Amino acid sequence: MKTILPLPYASLWRRAAASTFDGGLGVTISLGIAFIFGVVFGTPGLYFAVALSALLWWLYSAGLESSGLQTTLGGRIFSLRVASIEGARVGFWRASLRQGARIGAVLTILAVEEFVGERSLSVVVTALVVIGFAMAAAMPRRQALFDLASKTVVTQH
């Protein structure tokens, strides 16, 4: 039986700060992609830009979180690492599952708003996604819903 040592789990605020940094980086790149594809191809280009941006975000996040750094650039600035529940480095596929759940949650909000157009449904979906992220404040290991799904934790170093 493995002994799981207590890890220094990252606070919600430190995680939010790292996510804000990474999000700013991602939005800047995504806006550039959207501008280029929107100008060249119009509305279909914008849908392609969203898909391309999600793919690039997945590669950036999952690639860095499964690397020797175990974190993104924002995580590095705020001294965070993504690890398995035991504290070990995660592989690319586990990091991909984690990012897929994060990206899927955000894209669900965008899809409901864009394609369903029902305002009350959009508010409910957004609230559920926010709760999934905010769970990190209340869970013993400070895990958000996507961390639980991928059996990962975010530690502070």
Image: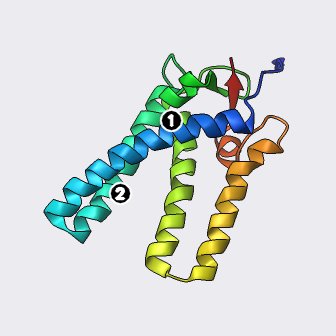
Quarter that holds the N terminus: top right
Q: Residues within 10 Å of mark 2 (few under 14, many from 20)?
A: some
Q: Secondary structure at mark 2?
A: helix
Q: Which mark is residue 49?
A: none
N-terminal of the pair, mark 1 or mark 2, is: 2
Which residue is nearer to you in this view: 151 or 19? 19
Identify whether 116 is placed above or below 100.
below
Q: Residue furthest left?
A: 40
Q: Which residue is mark 1?
A: 93
Image spot of residue 52 (x, y percent): 32, 51
Q: What amino acid is labelled 2 in the image?
A: Val
Identify whether 108 is placed above or below 102.
below
Which residue is nearer to you in this view: 102 or 114? 114
- Using the rendered view, name the quadrant where residue 48 is placed: bottom left
Which residue sits at x=58%, y=81%? 119
Q: Which residue is mark 2?
A: 50
Left or right: 66, with 59 as reference point: right
